[in-house]
Image (cartoon, grey):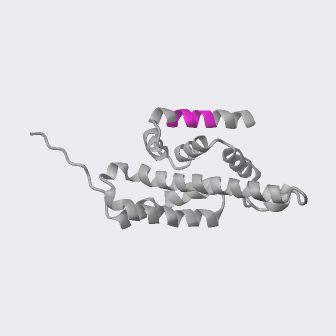
């Protein structure tokens, strides 16, 4: 009778230590704002902690945590878009859009700001897949798991994102 064993996930504290830096980098790149990234970082690990006992294997740990972080980023962006529409409607009589977001992307080299802006304009899955692949170094299967799609769809999202970025150059 063949037996196989799944490698159980490490204790939660070890999981946090092994991935906290790359999750924080992903959140910083996704949000472009340190405070938002810190909030989402804490929320990511809180949600992971609550659901950790249900994780069956160490193999799915990394994409699972990235999925949590990615979903939180998507929710935050959606909420900001809603609030932005309300603010835009309220200020249609007065100020310019530049007055509302003076330091949204922060300071830094012009090229990095341009790239941040271009990535932020990409459709949701494309931007997230691109950041997971190019900045976090995830494999397409991990990206697919994190974004709830196939590895082929993740690869296509990265390809389309890169194609759109090249067209903007």
Q: Where is residue 72 in the image (x, y as percent from the top left)?
A: 54, 56
The answer to whether any part of residue 79 appears in the image is yes
SS majority, magenta: helix
Viewed as shown, does residue 113 lie left or right of 162? right
Residue 12 falls in which quadrant of the image?
Answer: bottom left
**Placement of the N terminus among the 4 image quadrants:** top left
Residue 141 falls in which quadrant of the image?
Answer: top left
The residue under the point 63% across, 53% down is: 78
The answer to whether any part of residue 29 appears in the image is no
Residue 15: within the magenta? no
In the image, residue 30 above or below residue 42: above
* Nearer to us in this view, 154 or 54: 54
Q: Position of residue 87 (x, y in %)?
A: 78, 59
**Placement of the C terminus among the 4 image quadrants:** top right
Viewed as shown, does residue 157 lie left or right of 65? right
The residue under the point 62% across, 37% down is: 161
The residue under the point 74% across, 56% down is: 84
Q: Which residue lies furthest to the right in this view?
A: 94
The residue under the point 50% across, 46% down is: 137
In the image, residue 109 above or below residue 153: below
Residue 158: within the magenta? yes
The span shown in magenta is 154-161
Q: Position of residue 152 (x, y in %)?
A: 47, 32
* Nearer to us in this view, 12 or 91: 91
* Nearer to us in this view, 18 or 33: 33
Q: Position of residue 35 (x, y in %)?
A: 63, 67
């Amino acid at each position: 009778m063949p037996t196989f064993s799944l490698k159980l996930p490490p204790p939660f504290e070890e999981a946090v230590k092994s991935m906290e830096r790359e999750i924080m980098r992903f959140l910083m790149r996704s949000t472009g704002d340190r405070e938002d990234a810190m909030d989402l970082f804490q929320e990511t690990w809180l949600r992971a902690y609550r659901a950790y006992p249900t994780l069956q294997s160490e193999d799915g740990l990394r994409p699972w945590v990235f999925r949590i972080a990615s979903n939180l980023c998507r929710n935050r962006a959606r909420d900001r878009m809603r609030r932005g529409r309300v603010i835009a409607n309220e200020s249609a009589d007065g100020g310019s859009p530049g007055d509302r977001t003076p330091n949204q992307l922060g300071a830094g080299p012009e090229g990095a700001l341009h790239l941040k802006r271009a990535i932020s304009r990409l459709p949701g899955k494309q931007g997230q897949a691109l950041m997971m692949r190019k900045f976090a170094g995830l494999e397409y299967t991990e990206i697919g798991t994190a974004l709830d799609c196939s590895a082929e769809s993740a690869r296509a999202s990265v390809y389309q994102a890169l194609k759109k970025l090249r067209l903007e150059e």
